[in-house]
Image (tube, rainbow, N blue to C red):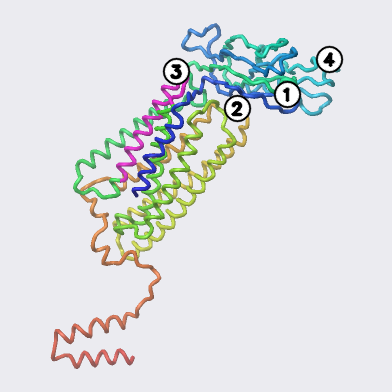
C-alpha cells in the first residue's frame, strides 16, 4: 500500500515538472517551425479545428460577444540555400466543415486534387499551380483564402494580420497550403487566436464549464449528507465507509479543479497547465480508488472477511497499473489540447485502460457471485439483502455502460468530420454522471448509522469460516450426530451409558 501511495504522490509532481516549462495553449494556436507535409499534389500544415458559435453581424473585436479567428505574426520561412528564386503564394485556407467540398476538384471524374492540374487548366477552370476552390452556396464569401509569396533572395514571407469575423455557427478548419514542390522545406511560425461569443473555450468544450460547475454543486450536496452522517455516528464507522469518504473528497476536488481549469481557459485563451494536471490527477486517483473500493466490497472485505489475505498484493498491483495507464491517457488527452479534433494516437492509450476496466468488471462480478453464495449458505440475511441491492446496481451500471459504448462508437463512426461537435460534450460527461450515480447508490446502502455494525465483520463470521472453499466434502449427518452424542452422554449421564451405547451400535450396523 505504501508503494501505491508513493506512486500516486510522485507521478503528478513528475508530470507537472515536465510540463511546467511549456506554454500550453488552446484557443491560441501557436506554430513553431511547423513543416509542410505532402499529400496528393499539395503541401499542408494543419492550423487548427474548432467549433465556433456565430456572433451578430457588425460586431468588432472589442465586443465581448464577438466571434473571430485572428492571424497574428504568421511568417513562412525557407532555408537560405533555397532562396534564389521567387515563388507562388503560400495560402491560409479557412473553411467551415460543411463547405469542405468547395476545396479541390478533379478532371473527367478522376482523382480529386487541391492544386490545379494541367488537365484542369486546359478546361479553363483554374490556373495551373493555384489552389482550386469555389464559393460556398450557403455563404458566398467563404471559404476565406489569402496568402503571401517569397521574393527572390528572401527567406521570409509574411502573412499580414487579419481578423475573420464568424457570423455562422460551425466547425471551422484552418490549413496552410502551397502547390510548389520547390517549397517543400518551408515551415510556419506565428499564432492564430480563435474566440467564441462566451469566451475562448472551443465550442465543443464550452458546455463543460457549466457541467463541472453543476457537478461541483452535486458533490457538495452529497458531501453534506455523508459528512453529517459520518459526524453523527463516528463511533460506528466501518473501514469501508472511510474509503467512501475518501472517494467523495477526491470527487469534490476533481470537479472544482476542472471547473477552474475551464473558467481560466475561457477567460484568457491559455489553458493553465498546473490546474489541468491536478484536475487530471485527482480524477485518476478517484477512479482508481473507486474501482478498488467496489472490488474489495465485492470480495466481502470489512463485511464478511477481515482481510483480503493473499489477494492484497494482486489488488494493489491492478490498482497501480490502472492508475498509471489512466494518468497517461488523461494527460495526453487534456494537457495541451489545442483543437477540437481527437488524435489517432489516442487509441493506443485507450486500449490498456479499456482492458484493465474489463478485468475489473470480470473480477468484481466473479467475487460478488462467490460472496452472495456464501452469504446465502450461512443465512446472513441482512448482509445478503444489501449485497443483492449492490449487485443489481452494478449490473444496471454495466448494462448501461455497454449500451453507451455502442452509441459512442456509432456517434464517432458517423461523425468523421466533427459535424456534430455541438453534441460531442455529452460523451465524456455521461461517464461522470454514471460514476456519480454508482457512488450515490453506495452512499445510500452503506451510509453511517447506528446500525452500521450490523453489516461489519464480527467474530461470529469468523466461526463460520467464511473464507473456506465451498467445495468441501460433506459429512454424513448420522456419523456427525453419533460422534457428537457419544462423548457428552458418557460424561453427563452415567446410568444410561449402556442404553445409549446400544443405540449407537444399532445405528452403526443399520
- Whether the magenta-drawn stretch holds residue 424 is answered as no
Task: Give the mark nearest the N terminus, 2 or 1.
Answer: 1
Q: CA distance from mark 2 to mark 1?
A: 25 Å
Mark 4 or mark 3: name the one nearer the start of the chain: 4
Q: Find residue 259 and report its horizontal and vertical position in percent.
A: 40, 27
Left or right: where 104 falls relative to 203? right
The secondary structure making up most of the magenta span is: helix
Give the quadrant of residue 435.
top left
Can you tell which mark lies on residue 268? Answer: 3
Measuring 71% from the left and 11% from the top, which residue is drawn there? Answer: 153
Badge 4 element: loop
Q: Which residues are magenta?
A: 243-272
Q: Are marks 3 and 2 in contact (CB under 8 Å)?
A: no
Q: Which residue is mark 2?
A: 419
Q: Which residue is mark 4?
A: 124
Element at label 3: helix
Disc on the earlier residue, 4 or 2: 4
* Secondary structure of the residue carrying numbered label 2: loop
289 shown above or below 281: below
Q: Earlier in the sequence, mark 3 or mark 2?
A: 3
The local crowd at label 3, few if under 14, some if 14 to 19, many if 20 or more residues have their Cα within 10 Å, is some
User: 419 above or below 364?
Assistant: above
In the rendering, at what x and y percent does residue 265 appear?
45, 22
Can you identify the residue that label 1 sits on? 42
Query: What whole-number distance in Å separates the C-alpha atoms at marks 4 and 3?
Result: 48 Å
Residue lying farthest front?
Answer: 81
Amino acid at each position: 500500500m505504501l508503494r501505491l501511495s508513493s506512486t500516486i504522490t510522485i507521478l503528478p509532481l513528475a508530470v507537472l515538472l515536465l510540463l511546467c516549462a511549456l506554454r500550453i495553449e488552446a484557443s491560441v494556436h501557436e506554430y513553431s517551425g511547423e513543416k509542410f507535409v505532402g499529400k496528393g499534389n499539395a503541401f499542408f500544415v494543419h492550423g487548427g479545428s474548432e467549433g465556433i458559435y456565430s456572433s451578430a453581424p457588425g460586431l468588432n473585436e472589442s465586443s465581448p460577444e464577438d466571434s473571430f479567428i485572428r492571424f497574428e505574426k504568421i511568417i513562412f520561412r525557407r532555408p537560405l540555400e533555397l532562396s534564389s528564386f521567387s515563388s507562388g503564394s503560400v495560402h491560409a485556407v479557412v473553411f467551415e466543415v460543411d463547405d469542405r467540398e468547395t476545396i479541390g476538384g478533379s478532371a473527367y471524374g478522376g482523382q480529386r486534387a487541391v492544386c490545379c492540374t494541367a488537365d484542369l487548366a486546359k478546361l479553363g477552370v483554374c490556373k495551373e499551380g493555384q489552389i482550386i476552390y469555389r464559393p460556398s452556396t450557403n455563404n458566398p464569401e467563404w471559404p476565406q483564402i489569402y496568402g503571401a509569396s517569397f521574393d527572390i533572395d528572401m527567406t521570409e514571407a509574411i502573412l499580414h494580420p487579419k481578423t475573420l469575423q464568424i457570423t455562422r455557427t460551425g466547425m471551422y478548419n484552418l490549413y496552410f497550403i502551397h502547390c510548389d514542390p520547390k517549397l517543400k522545406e518551408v515551415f510556419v511560425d506565428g499564432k492564430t487566436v480563435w474566440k467564441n461569443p462566451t469566451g475562448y473555450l472551443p465550442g465543443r468544450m464550452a458546455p463543460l464549464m457549466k457541467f463541472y460547475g453543476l457537478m461541483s454543486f452535486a458533490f457538495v450536496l452529497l458531501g453534506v449528507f455523508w459528512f453529517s452522517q459520518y459526524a453523527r455516528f463516528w463511533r460506528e464507522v466501518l473501514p469501508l465507509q472511510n474509503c467512501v469518504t475518501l472517494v467523495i473528497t477526491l470527487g469534490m476536488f476533481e470537479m472544482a479543479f476542472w471547473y477552474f481549469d475551464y473558467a481560466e481557459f475561457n477567460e484568457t485563451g491559455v489553458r493553465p497547465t498546473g490546474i489541468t494536471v491536478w484536475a487530471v490527477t485527482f480524477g485518476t486517483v478517484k477512479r482508481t480508488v473507486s474501482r478498488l473500493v467496489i472490488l474489495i466490497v465485492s470480495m466481502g472485505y470489512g463485511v464478511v472477511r477481515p482481510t483480503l489475505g493473499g489477494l492484497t498484493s494482486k489488488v494493489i498491483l491492478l490498482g497501480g497499473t490502472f492508475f498509471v495507464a489512466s494518468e497517461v491517457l488523461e494527460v495526453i488527452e487534456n494537457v495541451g489540447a489545442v483543437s477540437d479534433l481527437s488524435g489517432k494516437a489516442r487509441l493506443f492509450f485507450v486500449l490498456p485502460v479499456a482492458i484493465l476496466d474489463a478485468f475489473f468488471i470480470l473480477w468484481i462480478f466473479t467475487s460478488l457471485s462467490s460472496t452472495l453464495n456464501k452469504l446465502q449458505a450461512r443465512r446472513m440475511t441482512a448482509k445478503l439483502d444489501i449485497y443483492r441491492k449492490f449487485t443489481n446496481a452494478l449490473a444496471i451500471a454495466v448494462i448501461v455502460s455497454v449500451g453507451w459504448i455502442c452509441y459512442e462508437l456509432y456517434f464517432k463512426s458517423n461523425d468523421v468530420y466533427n459535424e456534430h461537435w455541438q453534441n460531442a460534450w455529452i460523451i465524456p460527461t455521461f461517464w461522470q454522471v454514471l460514476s456519480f450515480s454508482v457512488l450515490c447508490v453506495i452512499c445510500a446502502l452503506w451510509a453511517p448509522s447506528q446500525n452500521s455494525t450490523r453489516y461489519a465483520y464480527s467474530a461470529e463470521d469468523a466461526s463460520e469460516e467464511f473464507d473456506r472453499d465451498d467445495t468441501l466434502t460433506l459429512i454424513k449427518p448420522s456419523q456427525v450426530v453419533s460422534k457428537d452424542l457419544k462423548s457428552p452422554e458418557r460424561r453427563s449421564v452415567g446410568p444410561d451409558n449402556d442404553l445409549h451405547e446400544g443405540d449407537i451400535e444399532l445405528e452403526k450396523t443399520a
